[in-house]
Amino acid sequence: MQVPKIKTYVREFTDWMLTDEAQEYLPYWETQQNWQDHFNVEAKDLAASYDAALDSKTNRRHYRRGGYDPKRSMLAIMEWEPDFVRDAFRDLYSEDRDLEGRIQRFVFYINELFNRYRDAKPKARIPTHYHDDDYQIVSIYLMGQYPDKYAPYSTDLLQTICTKLGAKSVPPAADFPRYTKLLQTLRPFLHEEEVLKNYREVLRDIDYQGDSALLMFWFFKYVEQEGQAPQTAQ
């Protein structure tokens, strides 16, 4: 990564945070707080816990939009076989295990459970489980459980950030562990007084207020939407 490029983007991001466009991302923080408040993998009614946790009063597009509804499919599976889903989440949240293995196993488990669900309920009108989505929904589950470590993922976002910030190599395929490391690597650049001042100013009462990797994700989204990398002084 090229430090001058990062610092230039951070300066621009600091002002952008206060715009209406930037604040359209705040529902991520709302969902993060809801997950912290409601989700319990050991809850007797796992489906009710999940339903309350994956919610937003202001915008649900990060997990529910036209043609994409992983929440609906997960609720159906949970109500049918909650203990198997519980085991899948336990494994996903086992931080002592390899991250790549955990996310891949989780998607595999949900796929297998959904296939069994469809066999048991052939009249069900849920076309797919939507969890084979480039780890988008899995990253939301992780960001809810561990706010300071994980943030929403997409391979396109990772590749764009690596390209624009001058990384020595750009991953050719999905690399969730590298993305997670990148969130931590760039954290110090965003812990500047003006950035944190604006950050505290824009968060709403319903949003997660603790240390959150969403701040880095927010920065990534700004970098992603900008055209060319900014020019830096030589």
Image (tube, rainbow, N blue to C red):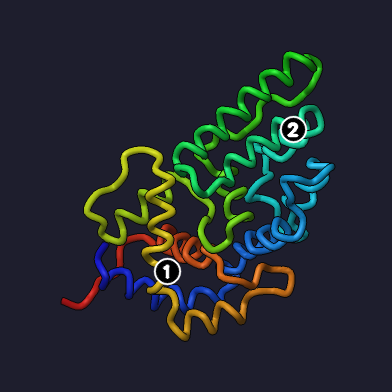
* One can see residue 69 in this view: no
Vertical position of residue 228 compared to residue 178: above or below: below
Quadrant the C terminus occupies = bottom left
Residue 83 circle label: 2
Label 1 amino acid?
Arg
Return the residue at label 1.
187
Vertical position of residue 23 compared to residue 79: above or below: below
Pointer 1: residues within 10 angstroms few (<14), some, or many (20+)? some
> In the image, residue 112 lies at what x, y percent?
62, 22
> In the image, residue 167 lies at what x, y percent?
26, 56
Label 2 amino acid?
Asp
Out of 127 and 191, give the one closest to the viewer.
191
Vertical position of residue 41 compared to residue 58: above or below: above
Going 65% across and 46% down the picture, which residue do you hit?
63
The residues bearing labels 1 and 2 have C-alpha atoms spaced at a distance of 37 Å
| SS type, badge 1 | helix
Disc 1 or disc 2, which is closer to the eye? Answer: 2
Using residue 202 as the reference point, say whether residue 170 is left or right of it.
left
